[in-house]
Image (cartoon, rainbow, N blue to C red):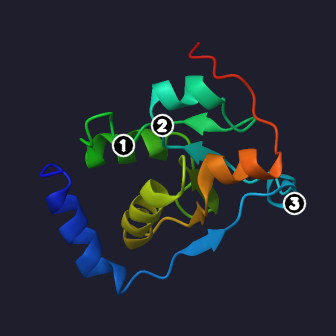
Amino acid sequence: MLRLLPFLCLLITSSAFAEGQKAYPDEKFFSSNISVIDIRTPGEWKQTGIVDGSKTLMFFDEQGNYAENSFLQKLDTIVDKDKPFAIICRTGRRTGLVATLLDKQGYQVIDLIGGINHMIKIGIPLVPYDPH
């Protein structure tokens, strides 16, 4: 938890200024062909599967550590900062934090509320994660 403290302090002070977009993941949303970045861990991707066509890019590791600069560099190879894209995690908690950071950096990010758990609950199919 102590590793998260500096990140959480940054987000709390900046969250009053961030006005990011949020959406519930549903079939209508995914039919829009918007890019989806899954920020969960490899273990989570293997456990539930992923959104068909999504890109996997872990933000927090299993211990709660993160490497912001490395994440942003990799993200920039996947998405166009000036075009909308969505991020998803297990419940939406992590994406709420990361979306605030990305919004502050000028990304056109959409936070998918409820995450993969919401998708499973409403019956949206996932595909197996293939690390290759």
Image quadrant where residue 104 sits: bottom left
Give, as a three-letter code, the residue at label 2: Leu
Q: CA distance from mark 3 to mark 1?
A: 28 Å
Give, as a three-letter code, the residue at label 3: Lys
Whole-percent x and y of residue 118?
68, 54
Circle on res. 71? 1
Earlier in the chain: of badge 1 and badge 2, it is 2
Which of pointers 3 and 2 indicates the residue nearer the eye? 3
Can you say whether 39 is above or below 52 in the image? below
Mark 1 and mark 2 in contact? Answer it, CB < 8 Å: yes
Image quadrant where residue 102 sits: bottom left
Tell which of 102 and 10 is nearer to you. Answer: 10
Tell which of 124 and 78 is nearer to you. Answer: 124
**Residue at the spot of label 3:** 28
Q: CA distance from mark 1 to mark 2?
A: 8 Å
Q: CA distance from mark 3 to mark 2?
A: 24 Å
Mark 1 Cα shell of 10 Å, populated few (<14), some (14-19), many (≥20): some
Circle on res. 57? 2
Give, as a three-letter code, the residue at label 1: Phe
Whole-percent x and y of residue 103?
44, 70
Toward the bottom, the furthest residue is 16
